[in-house]
Image: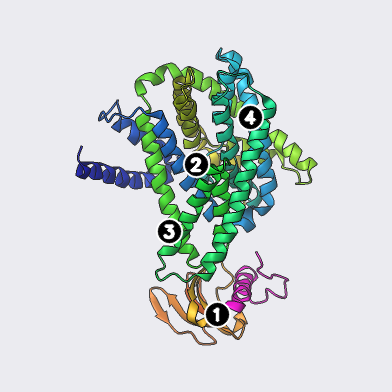
Amino acid sequence: MTLDVWLLVSAVIVIAAVISVRVAHRSGLPSLLLFLGFGLVLGDAGFGIPFADPGLAKDIGFLALAVILAEGGLTTNWSQVRRSVPLALILATVGVAVSILAVAIPVRYLLGVDTITALIIGAVLAPTDAAAVFSVLRRLPLPPRLAGILEAESGFNDAPTVLAVVLLSGTVHASPDLGSFLVETGSELAIGAAVGLAIGPAGAFALRRIALPVSGLYPIAVLGLTLFSYAGGALLHGSGFLAIYLTALVLGNSKLPHRATTRGFAEGMAWLAQIGLFVMLGLLASPMEMSSAIVPGLIAGTVMVVLARPLAVLVSAALGRLLGQGWVSWREQAFLSWAGLRGAIPIVLATIPWAAGVEGSKDIFNEVFVIVIVFTLLQGPTLPWAARLLKVTTPVEAHELEVEAAPLEELNADLLQVSVPPGSRLHGVEIFELRLPRDAQVTLIVRDGRSFVPGETTQIRADDQILLVTTAATRDQVEHRLRAVSRRGKLAGWYGERGLE
């Protein structure tokens, strides 16, 4: 096909995928199922577009996952997930190990496969999918600690599972050495973490001090830094996935210029990566071969959902309590078990042994494909019902105050754009009651599509857009005061609210 035809087909796919997101949102299904469907229709069973290169699929999948993880880190609120990170890390390491073994041991006998193949199946199914978790769970009113565990786990567990699958795929023709396996895994995770925690702060420092001529360059610079972190970590024989997630997490929670614009750009890129990834995986699959994978896939998937995931959560929660991280109630453990959504990541991981030429790896790919489709259909739409049944939901609260900033370099000042969300206690507060520092001034309010210069007694309303100029020295103080008033009203200081997080 010519370039014009390819562009036309690609544009139609993207537009159809965007429309399908609306359908998926209403039904509660992760959109990945519809995107996979597009790929299947375009492939052998439909329009006949040929694609059967697992090596290329693995490389494209890794790139797409890197972009998706970058978006996950950039849009994660550290203040909300900070308390959940220790438990999430336990789930992403110890929990992953428990899950691999809890799948591999029964599958070894139920499916009659060898030990290494059973371990590969367990490792491929171990990670939860960041895109699936974010798309479904961010619409549920969950307690911050519970939502934080699931979000952080889905960001952290990609790195150890990718390493596990790669190492296991290389031991097919050799005796596995547990000691070497653990040393190599620990080394790669440590290098990836070091790279991410070095590039993230350095990038934030540079972006705060370099005034770029066009606001659209900031999102590009941030995405470039995250991809640099991924590639740097990988070239140093570390975990690129851990590096990119940590870099994005640091950048997303730093006071960068045009932060809201950067998040919007990252979300758009992540959606594009998801669409391309799932369509590509649908193209790679062959529906004609799926029939023989249905029964093994259902067996392995049932073991994963009924045994492996609950056991991983139980062991991780117990270990977390021993380490002083507090107790996770049985209701929360049950929801964590059911909310361990699988998506593109297990399918991408299944291309690793296939590309490495592991015997029976095409069967593993087909079985994982069946598992993802069946159990996403089962778990995704039922999560709101499960949350209500287990009583782990919370009353809907006002969204956190969103502050966007643009640097005014010559004045050594910042222009802040403050969005007042519904439910904010800023509603009804008069400008003088904000008690902002002398170096800060509310210059404009945009309300109902009209803008005006406020006076001292102008009342702020929900859904207002406030433009405020402050010197760089007092910016933190201004943001803290605005957040405090948004949470507790004009007497926030009396109630001890400082708006620090």
Single out the mark in the foreground, 1 or 2: 1
Q: Which residue is mark 3?
A: 220
Q: Are marks 3 and 2 in contact (CB under 8 Å)?
A: no
Up/down of 453 relative to 189, above or below: below
Q: Can you say which quadrant of the picture contains the C terminus?
A: bottom right
Q: Which residue is mark 2?
A: 132
Q: Which is closer to the viewer, label 4 or label 3?
A: 3
Q: Earlier in the sequence, mark 2 or mark 4?
A: 4
**Where is residue 32 drawn, in percent x and y?**
42, 39
Labels 4 & 3 near each other (Cβ < 8 A): no
Q: Is 401 in front, or is 74? A: 74
- How crowded pointer 4 is (Cα within 10 Å; few <14, some 14-19, many 20+) is rated as many
Q: Answer with mark 4 or mark 3, whichever residue precedes in sequence.
A: 4
Is residue 495 one of those drawn in magenta? yes
Inter-mark Cα distance, 3 to 2: 25 Å
Of tags 3 and 2, the one toward the viewer is 3
Label at residue 99? 4
Which span is picked out in magenta?
472-501
Question: What's the residue type where badge 2 is placed?
Answer: Ala
Q: Can you tell which of label 2 and label 4 is closer to the viewer?
A: 4
Say which residue label 1 marks: 470
Nearest the eye: 149 or 450: 149
